[in-house]
Amino acid sequence: MSSLKISSFLSNSFCSTSPSTIKSSLHLQKKLHIPLSVTPNLKPSRKLFQELNGFSHTIPVLQDNSVNNSTTISTPSKATIIQLYAILEAVADRVEMHHNIGDQRDNWNTLLLNSVNMLTLSASAMVGLAASIGGGGAPLLALKLSSMLLFSASTGMLVVMNKIQPSQLAEEQRNATRLFKQLQSHIETTIAIGNPTEEDVKEAMQRVLALDKAYPLPLLGAMLEKFPKKFEPAVWWPSAPKGINSSKYQEEKQEGKNNGWNKGLEMELRNVLEVVKEKDMKDYERLGNLVLKVNKSLAIAGPLLTGIAAVGSACVTEGSSWGAIVAVIGGALATTVNAFEHGGQVGMVSEMYRNCGGFFKQLEKSIQDTMEEDEDQRENGELFEMKLALKLGRSLSQLRDLARKSAYSRVEGTTTDEFASKLF
């Protein structure tokens, strides 16, 4: 019954509506606009794309700004970015190469040390056994020849091992990997900031070639001298470097401003540089020369002791024990020397001091080059100060305190006891 009433009410209301009202209603509905998006935003997320494809390192990509004519990148700038990406690919390849070869040469150090020590100890045991055998004959001759061959083999292997210094080779490749990663990050930052120049391309190329020269991959003909006459810091930057500066971080000198530079900041940098030269550089030079002398002595002593042991084993005869004593003692001492030199990785320590000396030398040159430039051509002073503090492992307040201590000590005619670097 209720349904009949509702239908009757609807029919009556519809009939009571005039045709003009229906017409105007339809006309209004025709003009209604519903905001529907015909083409939804289906742009994929770049981060999701990288995760799905296994990328672990994000590289900034040149975006297409052709829609906005005011931000369109010029053709020369695009060519420059393409060149930087080509250099970036070469740098990434070098990072992988130096990392793999560093692992390989670290394995060399372990395997060669174990092999040489096993040969030396086996030969010493054979000499002792030969001396304990009563009478002569074939057993004594066999043990004598075997021990002599083993001592001779260990002597030859030690000469080669001490010449190439596998632990030092591995440390060279580790440093090269770190520096190439640093260069890779620098190039990526240059691209991300935008509008790189031809000078950035030339600088990147020079830095790649300088690193290739400082840390060569081959052994024959290009290997670095492991026992120079004097300790020399490593040099891995071009002959005319920009130091800490980069054209991307330089700011234009605004009217009425001094680009963050003042006399106080210049004096602070000079005082810090004085501490670096008087304390850090001299200390690492002293330690580097000391480790170099120790490494030279150990490199000579190892093969010399195994050679003496080989001669002693050849002189073992019936009724005479001095030859066996010389051979056994020589073998034991040679094993100890080898374990200390290569097990303790004295070559690696020498290379570490060489790299640290190079770090302070580069720091000194970058500060001097910056101070020699005109103020309007320098990097922003506050930014330069912050980067210097980070390189020395200090805060800005600690860096300024160090500069004040250096100034006071120079006035009093003494030297500060504090080192500039807190990292190493």
Image (cartoon, rainbow, N blue to C red):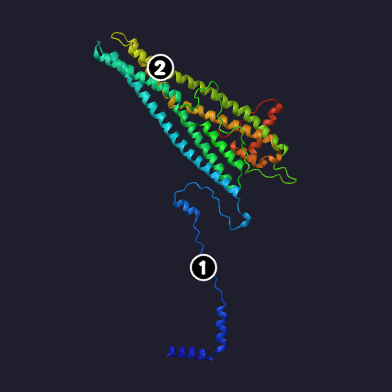
Residue 46's place in the image compared with 201, above or below, is below
Q: Which residue in the protein does label 2 denote?
A: 305
Q: Quadrant of the N terminus?
A: bottom left
Query: Which corner quadrant of the image does residue 200 belong to?
Result: top right
Q: Amino acid at mark 1?
A: Val
Residue 324's place in the image compared with 158, above or below, is above
First in sequence: mark 2 vs mark 1? 1
Q: Is residue 115 left or right of residue 286?
A: left
Q: Which residue in the protein does label 1 denote?
A: 38
Residue 296 is situated, as x and y percent measured from the top left of the image, at 48, 20
Label 2 with label 1: CB-CB less than 8 Å: no
Q: Is residue 185 left or right of residue 146?
A: right
Q: Nearer the viewer, residue 181 or 291?
A: 181
Residue at disc 2, secondary structure: helix
Query: Which corner quadrant of the image does residue 130 belong to?
Result: top left
Q: Nearer the viewer, residue 326 or 20?
A: 20
**How many badges with numbers are in the image?**
2
Residue 234 is situated, as x and y percent measured from the top left of the image, at 55, 29
As measured in the structure, the alpha-carbon distance from the residue carrying label 2 to the one carrying label 1 is 86 Å
Q: What is the number of the mark on residue 88?
A: none
Local crowd at mark 1 within 10 Å, few (<14), some, or many (≥20)?
A: few
Residue 285 is situated, as x and y percent measured from the top left of the image, at 57, 25
Residue 19 is situated, as x and y percent measured from the top left of the image, at 55, 89
Q: Amino acid at mark 2?
A: Leu
